[in-house]
Image: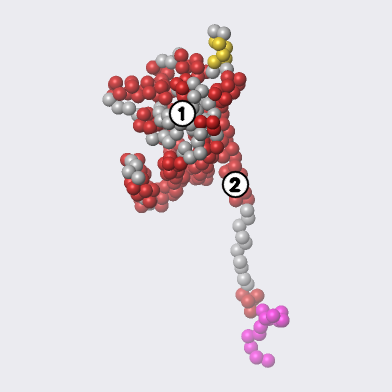
Amino acid sequence: MLFALYQGFRSELRVEHVLMIVVAAVLAYTGPRTKELLLGLYPLALVAVFYDAMRPIQKVGLTPERVHLCDLRNLELGLFGMNVGGQRMTPHDWFYLHHTPALDVFSSIPYATFLAACVACCIYLYIHDRQAMRRFSWGFLVLNVLAFLTYHLVPAGPPWYFHAHGCTVDLATRATEGPALERVDLMLEHRLGITFFHGMYARASSVFGALPSLHCAYPILILVEGWRSFGWKLRFVAMGFACWMIFSAVYLDHHWIIDALLGGFYAVITTVVLGSIGKLKSDVPAPAPVTTDIADMLEPAGGAPVSGGGE
């Protein structure tokens, strides 16, 4: 509520802020089970608050010299480059020249549904494994905090920015959805009269937050935290979604493969650390209950029992 008031004061109150308050109120006052679900979803909501709160300070201390762009591309070329027609190029370069409307739409789907997938995972774990739900939701928060810190410490440009501007870093460049998702928005506008990705990315505070890829980190967090609770079918779906997202991040020109790998590493490390902390807490023995025998209470300091009668 306080955050919504703050956003209203800044004239940045949006529909999703009001929706978050309504959903939180419904879950809090419907019953004890929904209240517990609210506590599980609470860290996910904190991420949204944290994301908006970071926007005014995202570019503090940012200079063109600090932004990693062509050095990341050179590293990508060295690790994952391929020779095509006598020319060394990254997979992004190849997809930049060979894209189709079908692949545009196919790759946009995980980008449009990744947050819904995280909420769905949290609800599923709430039903099947409450402890895993708590690890997942707090892991989601920790993962985002680590990523935001990395954005500040190691600002990095995405592949589409290189294809549009070369090695020139212009801090005045506004964050956009990139050419690939722009093509999807044009298709949506032509067929349905709406756009989706432009509004989402227009609210981003900086274009230089490619490293690590949270888009790739979220599905991996779902996979590793939900592995024990998922049956083999859901495990297959989770693995497929993670691979789909990584392919999409590369095809859409949004992330270097290095970004995707670091995002996955962050997700795994977050899971391991939080799991270890939870195990340490569970291994701490509970304090023994204090029991006092009535005879001990009646025993005087000298050790002889107190007689009930006279001499």
Q: Is residue 211 above or below residue 53?
A: above
Comparing 89 with 290, the one in front is 89
Q: At x 62% / y 71%, what residue is drawn?
A: 292
Circle 1 Cα neighbour tier, 10 Å, few/some/many (<14 / 14–19 / ≥20):
few
Location of the C terminus by quadrant is bottom right
Comparing 195 with 132, the one in front is 195
Give the label, 1 or 2, closer to the camera. 1
Left or right, 222 with reference to 34: right
- On the image, the x and y values in percent for residue 132 come to 52, 42
Comparing 82 with 9, the one in front is 9
Q: At x 34% / y 42%, what residue is drawn?
A: 12
Q: Which residue is mark 1?
A: 170
Instruction: Answer whether residue 78 is visible to the viewer in this image.
Output: yes
Instruction: Answer whether residue 129 is visible to the viewer in this image.
Output: no
Q: At x 38% / y 51%, what residue is drawn?
A: 2
Residue lying farthest to the top in this orientation: 85
- Residue 202 figure quarter: top left
N-term-proximal mark, 1 vs 2: 1
| Secondary structure mostly seen in the magenta stretch | loop
Q: Which residue is mark 2?
A: 277
Span of residues in magenta: 299-311
Q: Is residue 291 above or below residue 141?
A: below
Q: How is the image coloured?
A: secondary structure
Circle 2 Cα neighbour tier, 10 Å, few/some/many (<14 / 14–19 / ≥20):
few
Kind of residue at badge 2: Ile
Kind of residue at badge 1: Asp
- Residue 8 lies in the magenta stretch: no
Q: Are marks 1 and 2 in contact (CB under 8 Å)?
A: no
The secondary element bearing badge 2 is classed as helix
Comparing 178 with 31, the one in front is 178
Left or right, 25 with reference to 222: left
Residue lying farthest to the bottom in this orientation: 311
